[in-house]
Amino acid sequence: MGLAGLDGSGRTELLENIFGTDEVEYSGYEDISYIPQNTSLYLWMYQIPIRWNQKQLADEIDAYIRKMQLVFSQVPQGKEFVAFTLVDIFPTRFTDANFIVREAIVRYNTQLYNMAGTNVNFKVIDFSEFTSRYRSEELIGWKFYFISQMYISSKITSEFATWVDSKIQNIALKRKKCLILDLDNTLWGGVLGEEGINGIQIGGDYPGKAFLYFQEALSALSKEGIILSVCSKNNEEDVFEAWEQNPFMVLRKKDFVAIRINWNDKASNIVELSKELNIGLDSMVFIDDNPAERELVKQTLPMVAVPDFPKQAYMLPQFFMQLVRDYFEVYEITGEDKKKTEQYKANAERTRERAKFLNFEDFLRSLEIKIELQKVDSFNISRIAQMTQKTNQFNLTTQRYSEADVRQLLDNQWKIYCIRVSDKFGDNGITGAVFIADNSIENILLSCRILGKGIETAFIKFVFKLLVEDGVSALEAKFIPTLKNRQVADFYDRLGFSVMRVEEGVKYYMANIDKLDLSIPDYYSITVKQ
């Protein structure tokens, strides 16, 4: 990832010291005439200098609003521009009633928010989220400030770099998908098998009040698209009864997409949950108060995230927020994200339905699968960008695109189609996309939620039919292997494409699509959104 530190304040040294790699280009030192053009990401970080003249300082802040606008106007279309908010970490005013600098800071930050609201490639990071963790004397390393103008203390630069990286990951829409929860002393205080339904601690006085907060927080997280599952050593009947009868319970059976309540080892149960939900183990976070259980999962399933659980219930609010920051925070949440819980719950029902059929085609026919083909537009573009960032298993090139990138591809006359898939169990939302430039398939990707039902083949064959109708007879394609997309390594082969060459593991294909078998089974109902 390329970073361009655009710090017209003359303190670009800050970024150079923290991101001192060959991948980083810089423009600054009061010179904004050179704006690197080949980076994928631009960082703008202006912070208030140490200056006592308040009028002069306010004027400088206003000037940097204009400088930032000028720099942004020179950034290539479609490239992400990330700006940090302005924070006065070392106020230099003599009177509390002097608001001139504060007002300038408000103007600066308001302009950032306005630009983010009107430009899809302009993102804002709240710098106060980082600075609020420290006292002023911890933030500034005066020795280094006077020697090199390095604004942040060398003692916390590594923490700052880690924080910035996490924010960039959030902008890239990368987060975990599933939170797996223990029950006893995790969702409530006490052991259900010993204390009984009315004896466990949930609601009322402390510590029940803290566990109530935790359940409320988890419920809110679920509404933002995070899958909640249970993995607990307990008697299933006792748990179901507690969920139904305890009046303080916020989370109940209906709130969990998949449940494993038994006496098997938790690592094995988590593997089963992964298969039932059809998501990777690296998309999961496991929460358990028992350190022995956590260690078992850490050792057996190192790809599963296993944070330490707080020893005291009053630490649960802080634990929850750290959980969000470390694993579930993204820059923005789409409408599709908020439907995830119901979509995965429906997918689990499909898995159970499959077990009733001996013939796979009979099972598919029973699902009443509906596929709606859509062209990318302003309503679905954010979801398409998100899929490119998060989809790994069925992703033939693993090319990642921001929302601005997708808009640029459309401006370059790419054909981009997506599909909304539904069946008798519910609507999966937008779960597949294909990118076509001229006569080349640049990528095909599908969400793991719809894999295993042949939808990908029906989708692509239908797109091929449309292309043939438009006069396209031949298409090129490529497959770039990764550790996670091996299951689709032969996708083009199965469609009838011919391998033209293989270079460094990348397979290049070609096919006369008008000569391929484009028949689609009748148990798929495919329509085109007008």
Image: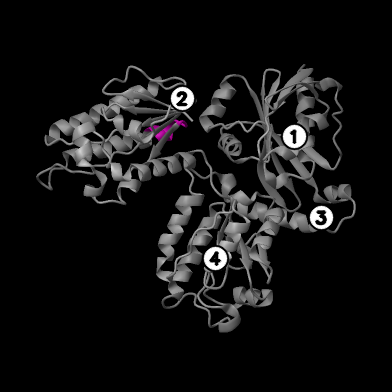
Q: Position of residue 371 (x, y in %)?
A: 74, 40
Q: Count residues near mark 1 (Cα–Cα under 10 Å), then give few for <14, some for 14-19, many for 20+.
A: some
User: Which label sits on residue 354?
Assistant: 3
Question: What number of labels is visible?
Answer: 4
Q: Is residue 345 above or below residue 474?
A: below
| Residue 172 versus residue 477 in the image, above or below | below
Q: Which residue is label 1 attached to?
A: 489
Task: Judge depth for marks 2 and 3 and give the one in front.
Answer: 2
First reached walking from the N terminus: tag 4 or tag 2: 2
Which sits earlier in the primary sequence, circle 2 or circle 3?
2
**Distance between mark 4 and mark 3 Cα atoms:** 32 Å
Dot 1: element: loop
Magenta segment: 115-121
The disc at residue 288 is 4
Q: Which mark is residue 39?
A: 2
Q: Is residue 9 left or right of residue 228?
A: left
Whether pointer 4 and pointer 3 mark residues with C-beta atoms closer than 8 Å, the reply is: no
The location of residue 443, given as percent across then percent down, is: 67, 29
- For the residue pair 479 and 105, the one nearer the viewer reads as 479
